[in-house]
Image (cartoon, grey):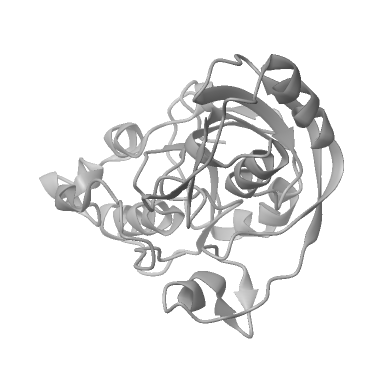
Amino acid sequence: MITKNSSEHNPDFDAGEVILIHKNIDWTSYDVVRSIQVFIKFNYGIKKVKIGHAGTLDPRASGLMIICTGKKTKEINQFQELEKEYSGTFYIGKTTLSFDTETLPDKDFPTNHIDDLLLQETAKKFTGEIEQLPPKFSAVKIQGKKAYEFARKNKDFEIKTRKVTITEFTLESCVLPEIPFRIRCSKGTYIRALANDFGEALGSGAYLSSLVRTAIGPYTIADALTIDEFKERYQVAKDPRFRKSVSFLYDEKRKPRIFDGLSRLNNE
């Protein structure tokens, strides 16, 4: 496994490697996979290399991703089943169409009635196995297409609820409007959907204002390499284009990814 603390070795991306990557905010998970794939192709001369990830992170989230190459892609399902850990903040009193900061706030809600006790008691209601409705702005498949493809065209469609398990939901402060939290949960859990549901349960509104995936099973963000760190360690070509992640798909002009509600750049 390639990690920040692993000893340097000659990687065999074709035979298979598992890489712990720290995804930057405003990158899609596809951006990460494609950037590494292009780097391997041109830096190591491997024309076709299988590559995939073990769990999507939304563009406005950062944190740990597990990337598998070559024959190690067969292990992706095993990594996907592992429990996930997140930290972040909920903004209480407003909502957005995407449930996070990728779209601008669209509604305001009262917060004067919210106190520490209500916040803590509400968090308890979302601990254990719950039914969750994924966001319409998501990659959930609807009739063979991703849900956000319908949502950004303002089309009506239905998403089914799914059972997810939240083993830990801790509020680390109760000072409004931004509430920091830590969550451990099963695969398939949408933290931004949890933010929206949490706001409704408070008799108000909420959206996910920041999110970091800090762990996947026993693997932590502390052991993950950024894209630039990964390329710097394993770069063998002399071409300077392969030294930095911004050389491939990331365009500084795209920052920040904030849209008016229905348009959404998401290649996942």
**Residue 206 on image: x %, y %:** 55, 40
Q: Is residue 157 above or below residue 131?
A: below
- Residue at image location 76% in from the left, 43% down from the top: 186
On the picture, is 185 further left or further right than 174? right
Q: Residue furthest right?
A: 129
- Residue at image location 22% in from the left, 47% down from the top: 255
**Residue 193 on image: x %, y %:** 63, 49
Within the image, what quadrant is residue 82 found in?
Answer: top right
Quadrant, the N terminus:
top right
Within the image, what quadrant is residue 124 found in?
Answer: top right
- Residue at image location 18% in from the left, 52% down from the top: 251
- Residue at image location 60% in from the left, 14% down from the top: 173
Q: Residue furthest bottom?
A: 143
Asked whether the viewer can see residue 151, the reply is yes
Q: Please tell me which residue lies in front, 182 or 153.
A: 153
On the picture, is 159 further left or further right than 9? right
Q: Please tell me which residue lies in front, 92 or 158.
A: 92
Q: Is residue 208 above or below residue 258?
A: above
**Residue 104 on image: x %, y %:** 36, 50
Q: Is residue 176 above or below residue 107?
A: above
**Residue 227 on image: x %, y %:** 34, 39
On the picture, is 72 further left or further right than 35? right
Asked whether the viewer can see residue 18, the reply is no
Q: Please tell me which residue lies in front, 177 or 127.
A: 177
Q: Is residue 127 above or below residue 257?
A: above
